[in-house]
Amino acid sequence: MKRKAFLYGLRAGIPIGLGYFAVSFAFGMEAARAGLEVWHAVMISLLNVTSAGQFAALDIMAAGGSLVEMAATQLIINLRYSLMSFSLSQKLEKKAPHLHRFLVAYGVTDEIFGVSAAQEGEVSPYFNYGAMCVAIPGWTIGTLVGAVCGQILPDGIMSALGIAVYGMFLAIIIPPAKKSRPVLFAVLVGMVISCLFAYVPVINQISSGFAIIIATVVAAGLAAVLFPIKEEGVSAHAE
Amino acid sequence: MPSNIWLYVLVMAGVTYLIRMLPLALWKKEIKNVYVRSFLHYVPFACLAAMTFPAILTSTSSMISALCGFAVALFVAYREKSLLTVALSACGTVFLVEQILAYLA
């Protein structure tokens, strides 16, 4: 059972790991350009596994920002993970030992959360470990390769790699949005609010981390009020 | 670059881990409220959507190439291809469009 979940997770992790390689390659290259040592860049990727937060960290370090600023920025940009962890706390196997939650937490990324949230019913922690075993090395090694040899790539390829992470996000949200009206609604509202924060004067001064949290809470909140999901059976009948 | 980079790395890793760990470790009981459950169900989609648009438009060196990459990614994702296929189609499109733009300019 554990083995099956783990193998299933490994398989789900392969496209994530390859996608991560492309995105973290760009991160490694930026880090080297900003003046970080290769091993610093690699350790940042291994310990954080978060795209937006790491890119923001580079700006802070390059600008000589304080540790408090670093902590606050990571808190804001990465706060969305607490919503995902909270969502996962409901979905993770109830019978799995509590220790698993500390390990699964390390690998809560947008994409790993995306594939585990897409599983039917409860999720085994071993599914997450499988996905993490491919995705995290992909993220870390991509950073290493990008930091070491990113400088030799032509600008055209670097520009093209910049869109990779968004392609991954779309691959996660579009198929469910196609099948479910409420999900499509949440997606569109999220995008519209995010546009307001990007383009409307005054409120476009709000940091992008906060903008994403507000857009997420409003869009998911509206969808929940307008399209509440009645219990789909499994756990309700079991009780 | 600050001289004590490891300190910065540890601070960011610590904050990021706590954000991910606390809700998972502290909350185990099942939420009964249908609105809270629905909210949590919609969170990932709303969040990824908000992060993608409009940021995707400025993710490359020209808005035209980004728009083309976005359109292709939408199409390929709609056909339910894998993460990697969608990401690489978007990258390939951006690369091609930028080569064409450079040729025209």
Image: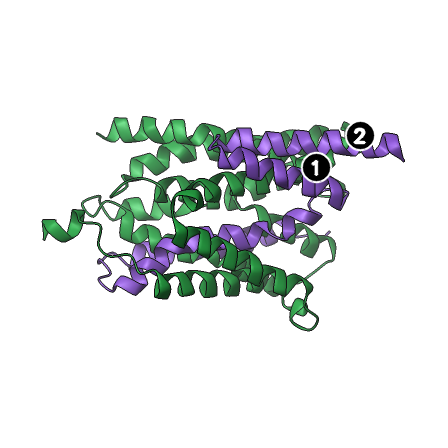
Quadrant of the frame with the N terminus of chain A: top left
User: What residue is disc 2 on?
Assistant: B99
Relative image position of residue A112 (x, y in whole percent) = 43, 40
User: Which of the pair A234/A25 is nearer the observer?
Assistant: A234
User: Which of the pair B76/B50 is nearer the observer?
Assistant: B76
Residue at image position (38%, 28%) is A10
The colour scheme used here is by chain
Residue at image position (29%, 44%) is A100
Give chain B's shade.
Answer: purple
Q: Is residue A187 above or below residue A128?
A: below
User: What residue is disc 1 on?
Assistant: A29
Q: Is residue B14 visible?
A: no
Q: Is residue A9 above or below residue A177?
A: above
Relative image position of residue A225 (x, y in whole percent) = 35, 66
Q: Which subunit holds the residue at mark 1?
A: A
The green one among the chains is A
